[in-house]
Amino acid sequence: MALTGSEQAYLAAQPRGRLATVAPDGSPQNKPVGFRYNPGLGTIDIYGFNMEQSRKFRNVQANPRVAFVVDDAPGQGAEGMRFMEIRGVAETATGQDSPGHASAHLIRIHPRRVVSWNLDPARPGLQTRDVDAVRPGEQSPGEQRAGEQRAGEQER
């Protein structure tokens, strides 16, 4: 499991996050996005309208390093703040079961590092941890999964 139970619960309760990508010229881009946690793959799947035409989609194809942030403020002051930052490697994919009217194209983030603040009431404050890159029996982010078509590939 890439994310803990409290991390998954936090993401499930949030309507949107922000995805930071790096353009080919090295400049950063940060955009609000819709998402969902994919427990079967342990990934964050980013959806949107016309995703395959977006700069963030092209940025991930050129440089797969990304950061994804979700935050909220259910209380006052620093104690009332919560956030989760996921740093990882992203890929573009197609052929997915997309929510609503979103494009079948998506950005899939494979978490490598998780930084959070106040997500777990039993462990308040800052928490950081690395996520295993590839566990035994799993594919690396660059490997194609059965039934999926990589963006830019034609079906055979």
Image: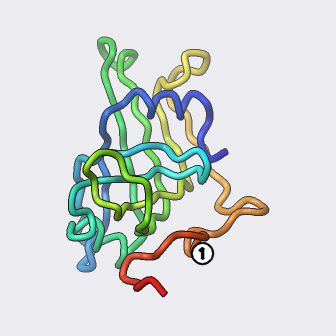
Q: Position of residue 53 (x, y in %)?
A: 21, 70
Q: Nearer the viewer, residue 117 or 60?
A: 60
Q: Position of residue 110 (x, y in %)?
A: 53, 58
Is 64 rendered above or below residue 4? Answer: below
Is 93 rendered above or below residue 81? Answer: below
Residue under the image location 28 percent in, 74 percent down: 58
In the rendered structure, the answer to whether residue 84 lies left or right of residue 54 reads: right
Residue under the image location 55 percent in, 22 percent down: 120
Query: Which residue appears farthest toward the right when viewing the image?
Result: 136
Residue under the image location 57 percent in, 74 percent down: 144
Q: Specify the amino acid type for callout 1.
A: Glu
Query: Which residue appears farthest toward the top when viewing the image?
Result: 76
* Quadrant placement of the N terminus: top right
Residue under the image location 43 percent in, 52 percent down: 45
> Which residue is the site of mark 1?
143
Q: Position of residue 87 (x, y in %)?
A: 47, 54
Question: In the picture, residue 52 is in which quadrant?
Answer: bottom left
Query: Which residue appears farthest toward the front when viewing the image?
Result: 156
In the rendered structure, the answer to whether residue 104 lies left or right of residue 113 reads: left
Question: In the picture, residue 132 is in which quadrant?
Answer: bottom right
Is 14 rendered above or below residue 145? Answer: above
